[in-house]
């Protein structure tokens, strides 16, 4: 099975050019390492920068977009696959199913929703896929402080907080996330992973 990572990011560019630059860096790095990109399917904002850079580096890019958005200007027309699903719930489920790991870049409420859903489901034992958070320009600094506050107030376990791999450098973050894609046995060789459930045969 080809390795793929879902990247959660925004349809906006942000107010600092570093957001676009690092989104592009993530796309290029994933392609260079032979990892497919799964993302929200748009052709603009940090989503577009991610997809364009991955494609330019010879990568495989799958966009997952809702039926409502697919008919407008949103879809990226140059990616390898554009999968259209019924709604945002189906979109998140499809992205999860296609991916062996997740990276969240700076983004808005939708990005946070996607991040928190995979983070919480990992804490509930529903999956063991690695989750990375790219803290470009200190974007997530206050969120990370709040997670520490949640721990100190007894509403979040340290184990749950520590499931997030956090880096400011895209390459360093990808190193950590990719290390979780192939668990190592005690001989230092890749361990055999259980087979993933079959992918959905239809599109919403």
Image (tube, rainbow, N blue to C red):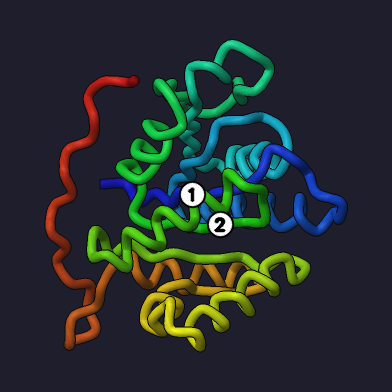
Residue 94 picture location, percent across and down: 35, 36
Q: Nearer the viewer, mark 2 or mark 1?
A: 1
Residue ID for mark 2: 104
Measure how far apart labels 2 and 1 are at the Cα level: 8 Å
Disc assigned to residue 126: none
Res. 114 mark? 1
Do the numbered discs 2 and 1 sit on residues whose CB atoms are within 8 Å?
yes
Q: x%, y% of residue 2? A: 32, 47
Residue located 32% across and 68% down the image: 123
Q: Is residue 21 left or right of residue 189?
A: right
Residue sitting farthest toward the top: 71
- Image quadrant of residue 52? top right
Q: Which element is circle 1 on?
A: helix
Q: Closest to the observer: 145 or 75?
A: 145
Q: Residue at x 51, y 58 (%)?
A: 103
Q: Is residue 110 above or below residue 160?
A: above
Query: Against 98, is 71 above or below?
Result: above
On the rendered structure, is 125 left or right of 123?
left
The location of residue 178, given as percent across then percent down, is 41, 66
Quadrant for the C terminus, please: top left
How busy is the neighbourhood of tag 2: few (under 14 within 10 Å), some, or many (20 plus)?
Answer: many
Mark with earlier residue (2, 1): 2
Question: Left of 124 or right of it: where is 88?
Answer: right
Residue 148: quadrant of the picture: bottom right
Q: Residue 22 location, x and y as percent?
A: 71, 58
* Disc 1: CA contacts within 10 A as few (<14), some (14-19) or many (>=20): many
Image-based side of 66 in relation to 130, left or right: right
Q: Residue at x 65, y 23 (%)?
A: 74
């Amino acid at each position: 099975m080809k390795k793929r990572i879902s990247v959660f990011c925004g349809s906006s560019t942000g107010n600092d050019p570093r957001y676009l630059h690092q989104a592009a860096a993530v796309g290029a790095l994933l392609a260079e390492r032979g990892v497919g990109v799964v993302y929200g399917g748009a052709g603009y904002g940090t989503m577009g920068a991610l997809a364009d850079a991955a494609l330019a580096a010879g990568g495989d890019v799958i966009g997952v977009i809702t039926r409502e958005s697919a008919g407008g200007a949103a879809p990226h027309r140059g990616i390898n696959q554009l999968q259209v699903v019924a709604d945002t719930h189906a979109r998140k489920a499809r992205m999860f199913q296609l991916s062996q790991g997740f990276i969240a870049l700076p983004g808005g409420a939708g990005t946070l929703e996607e991040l928190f859903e995979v983070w919480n489901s990992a804490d509930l034992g529903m999956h063991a896929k690695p989750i990375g958070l790219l803290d470009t320009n200190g974007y997530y600094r206050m969120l990370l402080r709040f997670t520490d506050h949640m721990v100190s107030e007894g509403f979040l376990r340290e184990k749950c907080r520590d499931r997030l791999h956090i880096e400011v450098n895209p390459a360093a973050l990808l190193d950590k996330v990719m290390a979780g894609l192939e668990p190592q046995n005690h001989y230092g060789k890749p361990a055999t992973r259980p087979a993933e459930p079959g992918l959905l045969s239809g599109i919403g």
